[in-house]
Image: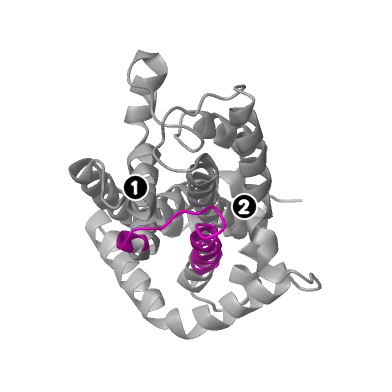
Amino acid sequence: MAARAVERIYSAESSRGRWRRLAAEMRRDLAAAPSLTGLELQRRLRARYRGTRLGWLWALAPALVVTLWATLAARARVLGAGDVGVAYPLFALWGLVLWQGLVESLTFQVEGLDTERPLLARVALPPEALILSRAGEAAFGTAVKIAVATAACVPLGFAPPATILAAPFAALPILALGTALGLALAPFNALEPSVGRILPAALVLWFVITPVLFEVPAGGALGAIMRLNPATALLDGARDLALGGALGAPWTYAAVAALSFAALLPAWCFYRLALPFLLERAGV
């Protein structure tokens, strides 16, 4: 049997023309996404906590458990928290709430592409609608956790400063950083499942070098590594506004926040460039 000839089509279109076409498609899909994002977000939120009596309070459970452990460890002098200026349970709770926002904004994007590839292949749906719904789910969950963490100030006898009202806005760069990293990693996870298995270990390592449960050491190798960690400035800044009344390092926070938002564009472009290839490789 003669081998079947493979038809190949070559185009003289320049790379600049391809980039212009991609930019036009991204603008078109982004403009069409808002009308579908709200519906997809509602579906995701209903599906996530369907059948649970406590609903979104379950979202705070991991932070509360780890906060309790950290508090008991600090009292037993197993964990050295240092002088954090406020009740340590509040310090740890806010750190964990913000950290969870970072992790969820990253993992929702990474896991979402792998599970939604069949939908994207069969339905003329703008990918941006799914990207925004996953980002919205992470933002909604973080807002709920911040509200509960704010309410926790009352039983702990802490009078929060007025700047606590700005804490949700200060958390937005954290979500932007997680979303950008998630968009960049999602194609690799869809192409190679081992990336998804490595990610939890990588997040544990990132947790260790982020001041979630304790402040950045003044010196030493760990302190130097933590200061180079972009999540450090963002998490400390949001927590400083919530509990301290002012940003501890405003210029550092502003610079890292700007870079986090700026990283969304190249991550989004990479995501869109990889998407046709991933759908083809999946055979859907």
* Residue at image coords 49%, 29%: 81
Q: Earlier in the sequence, mark 1 or mark 2?
A: 1
Is 109 on the left-hand or right-hand side of 117? Answer: left
The residue where tag 2 is placed is 281
Viewer-closest of 281 and 241 = 241
* Residue at image coords 79%, 72%: 53
> Residue 145, how many percent across, how many down?
55, 60
Q: Give the farthest residue toward the left.
A: 251
Viewer-closest of 54 and 28 = 54
**Residue 121 circle label:** none
> Residue 62, how many percent across, how many down?
67, 49
Viewer-closest of 177 and 236 = 236
Can residue 200 be seen by looking at this rendering? yes
| Element under disc 1 | helix
> Residue 11, how many percent across, how many down?
34, 60
Q: Amino acid at mark 1?
A: Asp
User: Where does the C terminus fall, quadrant-wise?
Assistant: bottom right
Give the vertical position of 60 relative to 210 (above or below): below
